[in-house]
């Protein structure tokens, strides 16, 4: 049995934030969950996927976040409690749905989880998704700890039903990827089927209907404000004439600082867990008892603006500070010492900071950037494209996935990236605005997510570029989730369909399509060359299973290779391919037999044919 | 209860996430509050993996520069890279078996000298315990048990609010049965290494 299905209430478990959230959904009676995978949210859905296999809980990996939200919205409007999980930038994709879903509302609870990523540990930006709650007008919850994340999901589901609106549940990486000992509650029986009550003049958002629905949304917001003022997740702590208003993980740093500085009687805290709408009566009361107040929040001055507006309304004139020079930054994540320092400074507290060791005299330590795995098929594809495009003035728009690591030398095969699907979209623009040879790269899962409309655009508007689709049979970067091109039967799952990328590309009307097996180096270079010579839109599908995924499926590859004494130290292998199985010993290139998967790429590249398979006798 | 802060740094694939999980489970079995966080998005792509563990009455799950009581390095250059997490009173435990970053192989940087790494850490902190944990893992029967060797050394210092028995129990209940004997042997070899 999956550990999150434990029926023993009051059981203590060491859980990752994302596991606690998944457990929270079960305890909240959620029966349908959807997602498109994205770090730092991925483990929530990985657990849902496993749980769905064992129970009547329904979970799906949708093609993108917009679709995922639409699936969940329909379920919630049929009376089934639902949840939709995504990383922060996923909500940009789902924003079109979100904005009008807020007008339509829900019947059963719907929680939309956005996992924000301050510092961009694994994201292209660090946008603060709290603005989506304000923009769409829905209520928002923000936990400060793993335990609270578990408890808050059930509250959010019930709040959603009470308000008849979806609720935004906002986490940050340090909630998702922190672990804590939590105590489980009970898992109620799930209601897995509902019935959709037709009411087209409520549900079909033509202008005349939407004009009424917007009024309804504002009414719901007003109700939400009242609930926010009495919500147990908005609470005060400590006493004194100084005030700190904080949310999320910042609360932990503030709380630890107050304890360490022993100022529980000087500084009081207002912790905001229900943050949209802000609890204006609570904030007003809190500010009335303060000589000055500090707002501690990562990201944008979201609460700060709200608190200042509330203060103005109540004619409170105390000093309120948050973001700014000598105060908190809008950049990156906070840490406990930084928060303690700014608090001590602002409130004039005695404090002697701990000095980190002096780092003088420490030599420069070589960087250890992540690298494409040994035998990664993307490396072979990049090599083939590089050889085929030799002498051309190339431009390489890329996309989101492991292959983005092709940015780094020695491959250096990435020139431009904005977001999911932008490879093909920007290729249309670059090929129009420049005379450079545009070659764009996109992974299979990303192609399904948002690469299809720009490819249709390219065919219709007759753009001139080559799109390389890296079909490695999985969503590799986020932990090997399936996508619509995967044969689920092969993975032991039944009841799934399969969509062929090749058929789809041909159906879109791309007239030049090549399919390559990238480990066949010579043939691949020739095929890419043909695609590059074609005037118009050409597509190369590079088909080879992700090496790491193959290993996890126990699909055996060839024997490892070694560098024989025929080697004349050209170093084409190491300098052009940069495979992590290579290392240098006594000025010679060697191959680590435990790391090498026998992809044969280097053996085909070596001008001396010096790289040979390890024989059993060796 | 006093707060003890531990940073663990490793290269993806060295098993440090299991090591921190074992410590977390030991804390759970022993009723000791623990908060931990990890950055592991690139663990399988050869990048650096860092875990922070805070034992005792604190809410934060991350550790600021200078605030680690103990730094546990699975790889010597990574231990040195993370040294700013320490202060003069910190204890550093590190494996001495190097895993040169790939950047070294393609001529972008030089791996620091192992003696220099040890001298620098020893001079800047209170105490350094350094040994070849890979050799001890092999001696225990599996090179992958390097995480258990390092846990053995860590717990032996007595700096964590956990005993050898409590951590052994967590290893027994939380690691794969097939590797249990090797894991416990590796843990003991780590105990001995820290006493040397």
Image (cartoon, rainbow, N blue to C red):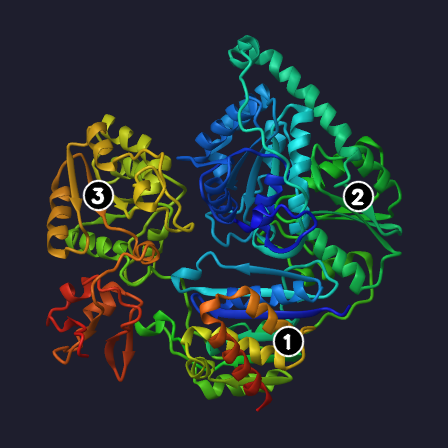
Q: Which residue is mark 2?
A: A235
Q: Position of residue A267 (x, y in %)?
A: 84, 54
Please say if A31 is above or below B158: above
Which chain is indicated by disc 2?
A
In the picture, measured across the screen, residue B96 lies left or right of residue A439, that is right
Q: Position of residue B59 (x, y in %)?
A: 71, 58
Seen from the viewer's position, the closer of residues A67 and B114 is A67
- Label placed on residue B183: none
Looking at the rendered structure, whether the residues under marks 2 and 1 are on a common chain is answered as no
Q: Residue at x 69, y 38 (%)?
A: A275
**Which is nearer the N-term, disc 2 or disc 3?**
2
Q: Is residue A300 visible?
A: yes
Q: Are marks 2 and 1 in contact (CB under 8 Å)?
A: no
Q: Quadrant of residue A500?
A: top left
Looking at the rendered structure, whether the residues under marks 1 and 3 are on a common chain is answered as no
Please say if A552 is above or below A154: below
Q: Position of residue A263 (x, y in %)?
A: 85, 60
Distance between mark 2 and mark 3 Cα atoms? 55 Å
Q: Which residue is mark 3?
A: A541
Q: Quadrant of the C terminus of chain A?
A: bottom left
Seen from the viewer's position, the closer of residues A427 and A207 is A207
Which chain is indicated by disc 1?
B
Seen from the viewer's position, the closer of residues B66 and A180 is A180
How many residues crowd mark 1 within 10 Å: few (<14), some (14–19), many (20+)? Answer: few
**Element under label 2?**
strand
Q: Nearer the viewer, mark 1 or mark 3?
A: 1
Q: Position of residue A212 (x, y in %)?
A: 62, 11
């Amino acid at each position: 049995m999956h550990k999150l299905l434990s029926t023993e209430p009051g059981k203590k478990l060491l859980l990752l934030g994302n596991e606690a959230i998944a457990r929270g959904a079960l305890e909240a009676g959620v029966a349908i969950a959807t997602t498109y995978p994205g770090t730092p949210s991925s483990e929530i859905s990985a657990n849902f996927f496993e749980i769905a296999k064992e129970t009547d809980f329904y979970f799906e990996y949708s093609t993108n976040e917009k679709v995922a939200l639409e699936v969940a919205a329909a379920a919630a409007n049929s009376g089934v409690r639902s949840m939709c999980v995504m990383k922060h930038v996923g909500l940009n994709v789902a924003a079109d749905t979100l904005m009008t879903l807020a007008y339509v509302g829900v019947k059963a609870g719907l929680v939309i989880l956005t996992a924000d990523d301050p510092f961009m540990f694994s994201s292209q930006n660090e946008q603060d998704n709290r603005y989506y709650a304000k923009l769409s007008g829905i209520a928002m919850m923000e936990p400060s700890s793993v335990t609270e994340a578990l408890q808050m999901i059930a509250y959010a589901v019930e709040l959603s039903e009470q308000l008849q609106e979806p609720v935004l549940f906002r986490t940050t990486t340090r909630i998702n990827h922190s672990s804590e000992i939590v105590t489980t509650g009970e898992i109620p029986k799930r209601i897995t089927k509902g019935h959709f009550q037709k009411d087209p003049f409520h549900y079909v958002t033509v202008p005349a209907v939407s004009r009424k629905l917007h009024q309804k949304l504002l009414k719901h917001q007003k109700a939400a404000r009242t609930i926010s003022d009495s919500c147990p997740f908005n609470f005060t702590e400590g006493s004194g004439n100084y005030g700190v208003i904080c949310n999320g993980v910042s609360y932990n740093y503030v709380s630890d600082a107050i304890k360490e500085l022993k100022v529980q009687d000087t500084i009081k805290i207002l912790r905001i867990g229900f943050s949209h709408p802000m609890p204006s009566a609570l904030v007003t009361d809190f500010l009335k008892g303060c000589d000055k107040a500090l707002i501690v929040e990562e990201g944008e001055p979201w609460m700060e603006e709200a608190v200042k507006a509330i203060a103005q309304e109540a004619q409170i004139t105390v000093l309120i500070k948050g973001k700014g020079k000598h105060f908190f930054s809008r950049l990156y994540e906070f840490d406990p010492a930084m928060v303690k320092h700014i608090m001590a400074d602002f409130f004039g507290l005695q404090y002697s900071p701990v000095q980190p060791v002096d780092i003088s005299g420490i030599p420069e330590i070589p960087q250890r950037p992540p690298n494409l795995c040994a035998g990664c098929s993307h490396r072979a594809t990049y090599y083939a494209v590089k050889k085929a495009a030799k002498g051309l003035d190339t431009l390489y728009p890329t996309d989101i996935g492991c292959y983005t690591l092709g940015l780094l030398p020695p491959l250096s095969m990435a020139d431009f990236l904005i977001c999911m699907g932008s490879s093909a979209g920007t290729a249309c623009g670059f090929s129009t605005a420049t005379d450079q040879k545009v070659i764009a790269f996109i992974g299979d899962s990303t192609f399904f997510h948002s690469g299809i409309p720009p490819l249709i655009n390219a065919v219709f508007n007759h753009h001139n570029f080559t799109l390389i689709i890296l079909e490695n049979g999985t969503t590799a970067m986020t932990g090997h989730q399936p996508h619509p091109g995967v044969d689920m039967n092969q993975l032991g799952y039944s009841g799934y369909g399969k969509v062929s990328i090749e058929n789809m590309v041909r159906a879109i009307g791309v007239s030049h399509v090549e399919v390559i097996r990238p480990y066949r180096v010579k043939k691949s270079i020739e095929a890419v060359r043909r695609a590059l010579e074609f005037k118009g839109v050409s597509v190369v599908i590079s088909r080879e299973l992700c090496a790491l995924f193959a290993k996890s499926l126990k699909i055996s590859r060839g024997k490892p290779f070694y560098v024989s004494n025929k080697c004349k130290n050209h170093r084409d292998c190491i300098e052009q391919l940069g495979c992590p199985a290579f290392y240098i010993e006594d000025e010679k290139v060697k191959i680590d037999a435990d790391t090498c998967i026998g992809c044969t790429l280097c053996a085909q590249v070596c001008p001396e044919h010096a790289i040979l398979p390890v024989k059993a006798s060796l | 209860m006093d707060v003890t802060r531990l940073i663990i740094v490793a290269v993806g694939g060295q098993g440090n996430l299991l090591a921190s999980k074992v410590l977390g489970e030991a804390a759970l079995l022993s009723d000791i509050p623990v908060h931990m966080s990890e950055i592991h998005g690139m663990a399988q792509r050869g990048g650096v993996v860092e875990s922070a563990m805070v034992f005792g009455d604190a809410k934060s799950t991350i550790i600021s520069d200078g605030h680690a009581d103990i730094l546990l390095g699975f790889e010597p250059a990574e231990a040195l890279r993370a040294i700013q997490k320490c202060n003069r009173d910190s204890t550093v435990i590190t494996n001495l078996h190097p895993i040169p970053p790939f950047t070294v192989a393609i001529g972008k940087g030089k791996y620091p000298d192992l003696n220099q790494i040890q001298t620098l850490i020893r001079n800047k902190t209170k105490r350094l315990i350094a040994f070849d944990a890979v050799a001890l893992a092999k001696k225990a029967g599996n090179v992958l048990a390097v995480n258990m060797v390092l846990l053995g050394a860590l717990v032996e210092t007595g700096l964590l609010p956990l005993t050898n028995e409590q951590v052994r129990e967590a290893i027994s209940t939380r690691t794969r049965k097939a590797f249990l004997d090797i894991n416990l042997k590796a843990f003991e070899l780590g105990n001995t290494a820290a006493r040397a």
